[in-house]
Amino acid sequence: MTRLETAGALIGRTVERVEDAGLLTGRGRYIDDLPVRRDTAHLAILRSPHGHAEIRAIDTTAARALPGVFTVLTGEDVARLTRSMTVGVKANVECWPIARDRVRYVGEPVALVVAENRYVAEDALDLIEVDYAKLAAVVDPEKALAADAQVLHPSLGTNLINERIFRYGDPEAALATAAHRISIRIAYPRNSCTPIETYGVIAEYDPGEDAYDVTANFQGPFSIHAVISRALNVPGNRMRLRTPPDSGGSFGIKQGVFPYVILAAVAARVAGRPVKWIEDRLEHLTASVSATNRVTALEAAVAADGRITALFWDQLEDCGAHLRAPEPATLYRMHGNMTGAYAIENVAIRNRVVLTNKTPTGLNRGFGGPQVYFALERLVHKIAVELGLDRLDVIRRNLVPADAFPYRTATGGLLDSGDYRVALDRALGEGGLEAMRLRRDEARAEGRLYGIGYAAVVEPSVSNMSYITTVLTPEERAKAGPKNGAQAVATIAIDPLGSVTVKVASVPQGQGHRTVLAQVVAERLGLSLEAVRVNAELDTARDAWSIASGNYASRFAAAVAGAAALAADRIRDRLAAIAAAQLNVTADSVDFGAGKLFDRNNPDNAVSFGRVAAASHWAPGTLPDGTGQTIRETVFWTPEQLEAPTATDGINSSLCHGFIFDFCGVEIDRTTGQVRIDRYVTMHDCGRILHPGMVDGQVRGGFAQAVGAALYEEYAYGGDGSFLTGTLADYLIPTVMETPEPLILHHETLSPFTPLGAKGVGEGNCMSTPVCIANAVADALGVEDIQLPLSPSRVSEWLYGEERPPSKPRDPTPAATGASGERMLTGSGSAEVTATRDSVWAMLLDPNTLKAIIPGAHEVRKVSDTHFRAEVTLGIGPVKGRYRADIRLSDMVEPEAVTLSGGTEGALGSGRGTGRVTLTETTTGTRIDYRYEAAIGGKVASVGGRLLDGAARVVIGQFFQALARHAGSASDAIGLKKRLSTLFRRRR
Amino acid sequence: MPHLNAAQRHLVHFTLNGRMVRAEVENRMLLSDLLRHEIGLTGTHVGCEHGVCGACTVQIDGKPARACLTLAQQIRGSNIRTVEALVTDPAVLSPLQAAFRHHHGLQCGFCTPGILMSLDALLRERPDAGRKEIREHLSGHLCRCTGYATIIEAALDAAEEQRKEETPNA
Ligand code: FES
Ligand code: FES
């Protein structure tokens, strides 16, 4: 393609952002800020407390009867008005946005309430009774494949939903002749770049036209629009999807709002009024979307000098409970660059996708990159260590050489440009590797733990819309019809006063698209930045868009800004022709600048931009013949390099491939196991830099998220499928205190495939940084099996495991983890009351007394003499919930002893336990002794153990204090309270 | 705080960005919901509603506070300031806001109003705050976009600017 010249008057400069004045003064327009119709109701969602259970019955009677509730919908109600969402592989499964006969992950929607406001809607959720029959949960992707594993989708008959095997070159021959075979096994954890703004949807249904109109903070890709329309059973033109002007970050995550678009749309239809839903943070962390966790076995055939001749990938991808569009894209996004930054001729790949009882996965910054590069770069580190080679030498020896670009990878990718070795050497020099090595040597000489890590990756951007079809066999692909390309679109419009508006379908999530587009277009038309206005939100009923539209795969700078430049050039050429006639010169001597069109050879011979630009409106008849209008120009651009997969499964999965080389030094605190990043250097080649400030902002932001993924963040599940990190107090996002400032370096080699020479840059550090830090930790500790996140507790296990056994054996009883991932609590205590033993006994068996003394009880019902039902509200730490308890009495020795056993269940978790209570007569009354053993699952179990144990003791203490108050005189109770509190403090 | 009947709405009076406001609210109404959904000042954002992210930070009687952890009933008679009050002339950014724009201290802007309200309070109370203090002060806020460095630069710059303005050039 022809290279467009950039004068550089605006492109490449760090101008202030046009977005910021509004955002800084509280005038942003995020989804929850938008005006809505006056009759808009609010949606709240009842969610599964279980990882895996059958739904036996749902009783919504009480919820419907609550004043202010408009309607309540179950999965069956939704199913009647919709179709299953499209699944991206050939498999006999359905994929619904709400549970029908079974729940398969904690947080899965079970019922919808539409009410006059959010408070009432949430009240109504408490009144819905769901009868669940728990099933064994499948959490570990490898165990999900076992012959006797519980199957999530009976129609599928297995948890393995897809398997494909690929072979490129002759990997077996390379292995047979290799000097070494070196392998590594990785279990990459789940995490999420979770934005600070949660999901939001405003939906409306017009029965007259059978049409939906939805505004959602969706980020694309708009291929999902087809999934939504099909699920709602309407043609695409009856599913109008709009995005708000501002979005509070996404990082891929807001692609996952689409099942809620469907739910809110149906709820609006049934309620007969617009419905608004704003997700809360607990819902977001538990059930919005997550990156995949992946188990990878990677083996390399290696020559004696460290040169890699073949790679054998075995990837087991865990997509959670349902395979939601566009999954299993995480597994295939990197398919063209599975050899990373290296020239490796032979590759074998086995890709398997498994379903487990976890939140379904979707887009997440880095999308597949962190999982792939963690394995590949850990392996390169290991190769050097095992062969006794310098790690940098092994990297250098394998890098794609500069004269090989554009370089076709073994798996079909086309690496567009680069000069990897030079970029690497510049990074080492300018980043100060020598000084870092000295610090490491000094630290080690003092007995401190210091390590250095490296990582070299290519960062793909501008996804080929057909890469996901690589999951199909060539025959299946042939049947489904060809898919390829990635249409980017930009429109430039000129109004009657001659001012310029740019319209794109890029749906920015905070990346400053409007500023960059103004730079690009203003520069090409010789205007000031302020003269150009940009609109980047999307309305599918009105705007130019394609399935590739949206904000993902780092496509903005490379594709969207490029399309805008092309559109500007088309307008520019026509304006030049019009001006030429007026200036009496030829079009090729017309230049643009300072808001004027002028004769390059005689700049005084000029006419104002506005006058020429408006001519199409006011006097179309005066335009030179054949010029065409200048009112509006829309350019669709799709790069020819994005071809469909070949018959042998070669796929150029992305248009551009930036290069990143990172190195870092970390120090590990021997006492606490804490990893401190001493220095981090990140070198980027992202092609032409359009706005240096924003590029560095993308790098820093991605880096901070990657530090989180490396050291703190994990979407953790208990063995019973309970979700353990449901608040921002459990899912630890780095604050300013945990985020070091990286040194950012750039090396520009322009992409020959994009209009401006730019490549994507936003995701690279999410791919390179976790493994770079892991390699540094491996270097510091000499440990090979590094698992993320590198939390102090995990690191200290390696430290103490290696150096000395724990000084004290662990106390086996308190706060262990139950067999099925539940949290175990045990405790005991005693209390003295002034009442006689007989009357205490009677109180313990009387529902009215129990209601008065059980903390938070609303109701206690006696089902039989030995069976009680109670409704209680309890708050533990930040988690307050309503629970239903079922209590049975056994082993009764009247009036001396009784065993209470029971279970409790609520939206936030479940528990079961037994307690033995014994009553002994004393001189002043009765002594009550109790010991209990309980297991807690669900969200409450994610509350820190110390908090939970403490809270349980307080609740149980409150129970006996209330009993004492009930049984004894007031003055006694005060004395008793003191005794009790000392007692409880002492016990532990 | 007086004893309130849960079944009724109750009147609260307070000063909001310099003007007296009266509102009738349910006892359980959060200050964040009152500001955003009853009064319509949507500059105060909500990111977690459990007190961790800091997006909802406003000033109550000059001190930064989480609007999501405050009940509307608790602010009777208080003086509340939100991000909307940081500019006096809508066309001119305050020095702190201008520094954020200059240093690219924001991307999506969702965390920004809360951070501005915290920093505004800090710089008023301690005009000589340096990098360390600013960092510590910011540790109560989560930003998922910027990686924080540019926020610190902006705050340092604004502090310096403020000191210059306050030193009489005699
Ligand atoms: S919304 Fe208040 S702290 Fe997060
Ligand atoms: S700018 Fe997006 S969260 Fe801070």
Image: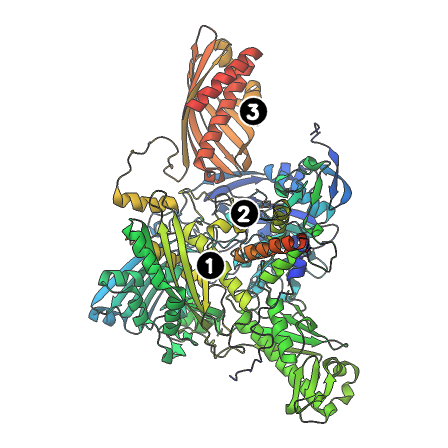
Give the side of residue A842 with respect to residue B41, left or right: left
The mark found on residue A703 in the picture is 1
Disc 2 marks which residue? B133
Q: The disc labelled 1 sits on which kind of residue? A: Phe
Residue A141 percent coordinates (x, y):
37, 52
Within 10 angstroms of label 3, few (less than 14), some, or many (20 or more) residues? many
Q: Describe the element under mark 3 as helix, strand or loop.
A: strand
- How far from the left and from the top, in percent, is residue B8? 73, 33
Q: Is residue B64 above or below residue A21?
A: above
Image disc number at residue A860: 3
- The reply to whether label 3 and label 2 mark residues of one chain is no
Mark 2: amino acid? Glu
- Identify the chain of the residue marked 3, using the numbered disc in the image: A
Q: Quadrant of ligand 1?
A: top right
| Residue at x 60% of width, y 60% of height | A233
Image height check: is A354 above or below B62? Answer: below
- The CA distance from mark 3 to mark 2 is 53 Å
Q: Quadrant of the N terminus of chain B?
A: top right
Camera sees residue A273: no
Q: Nearer the viewer, mark 3 or mark 1?
A: 1
Side (left or right) of A916 relative to B18: left
Residue lying farthest to the top in this orientation: A923
10 Å neighbourhood of mark 1: few (<14), some, or many (≥20)?
many
Q: Report the coloring of the rendering.
A: rainbow
Q: How many marks?
A: 3
**Residues at marks 2 and 1, CA–CA distance in whole angstroms:** 23 Å
